[in-house]
Image (cartoon, helix red, strand yellow):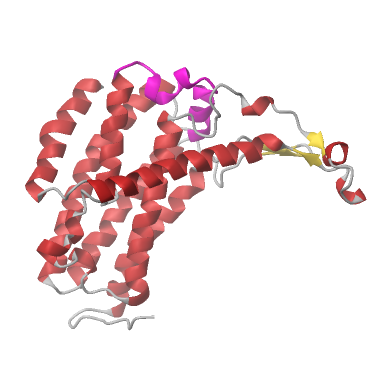
Amino acid sequence: FKEDILPKGTSQFMHSMGPFLAVFPVLVSFAVIPFGPPLTVGDKVITLQLANLNVGLLYIFAMGSLGVYGLVLAGWVSNNKFSLFGGLRASAQMISYEITMGICIVEAIAAYQTLDLQEIVYAQGANPLNWGIFMYPPFNIIAFIIFFTSLMAETKRSPFDLPESESEIVAGYLTEYSGMKFLLFWLGEFAEIAVASTLVVLLFFGGWHLPFFDITTIEPFLLGSVFPFLPAFLHDFNFQLAPLLGAMVFGAKVFFFCVLQVVIRWTLPRFRYDQLMNLCWKIMLPISIVNV
């Protein structure tokens, strides 16, 4: 409910495009995330993802790359040197850490031989030893550590929140934003945490699979046979437990990694900006290339 203040020397349209471009790519990234095993209704099989793309992994990274434009635009149109500095920091940081993430993804593609996220989950199965983090040890463990660190830098969370560090540049690209536009930036940032957690779960921790138990083997049953006290029109309803259980397992894993990112935020102090870039270009990038 705060007043939407427009800086002098800019347009309302361009000022509004910054938060829109920051949040839109993140929200549409959820379209290809498989959050459970397929659901069968009559003769039709429904996959529990909005868009069943065979290049889902590539799609998520394409959308993630577009988020840079929103932050750069926000810093530029704010007509404020603090904001411009924050936008430059954000673009350099996000582009740098996208490179290390991309190299880690090369390892995943080499391991799974596909870009389809649903196929990647099926390839891992219910045995945790076949999950991504335990494939080709120790290479995928190293890939997971680099990938997770890069994701935290990509989402601009502590200790990587240099684009908006209050002690140095007031609030970076957010300085001249208030009200709903300010909220959209934060909505996009916290949605990025959820997308990052889903990627970690899908690539390294078996997706919606439960350890040591194959959810897809659970047979559907008629509700009336288990709950005879239900109304008559529900007795012949063919209830499938597998998609519901799979979605709950997937949600629990994603929730764990969301909480882990928040706990890390509370635990570690912020890097200096030169340390942030050195970590990417001089340490993580060479390790990830050697790892591939």
Residue projecting furthest to the right: 232
Q: Quick check: is 127 in the magenta stretch?
A: yes
Q: Is residue 72 visible?
A: yes
Residue 224 lies in magenta, yes or no?
Answer: no
Q: As rendered, which of 147 and 167 lies closer to the eye?
A: 167
Farthest front residue in view: 267
Q: Residue at x 33, y 64 (%)?
A: 185
- Is residue 144 positioned above or below 71 on the image? above
The quadrant in which residue 214 appears is: top right
Q: Could you say which is closer to the camera, residue 207 or residue 264?
A: 264
Can you say which quadrant of the picture contains the N terminus?
bottom left
Looking at the image, residue 77 sits to the left or right of residue 232; the answer is left
Measuring from the top left, give residue 106's x and y in whole percent. Answer: 32, 28
Q: x and y percent of residue 65 in the render?
A: 30, 48
Q: Which residues are magenta?
A: 117-138
Q: x and y percent of residue 39 in the render?
A: 68, 38
**Viewer-closest of 248 and 150:** 248
Q: Residue at x 13, y 73 (%)?
A: 80
User: Is residue 243 found left or right of 13 in the rendered image?
Assistant: right
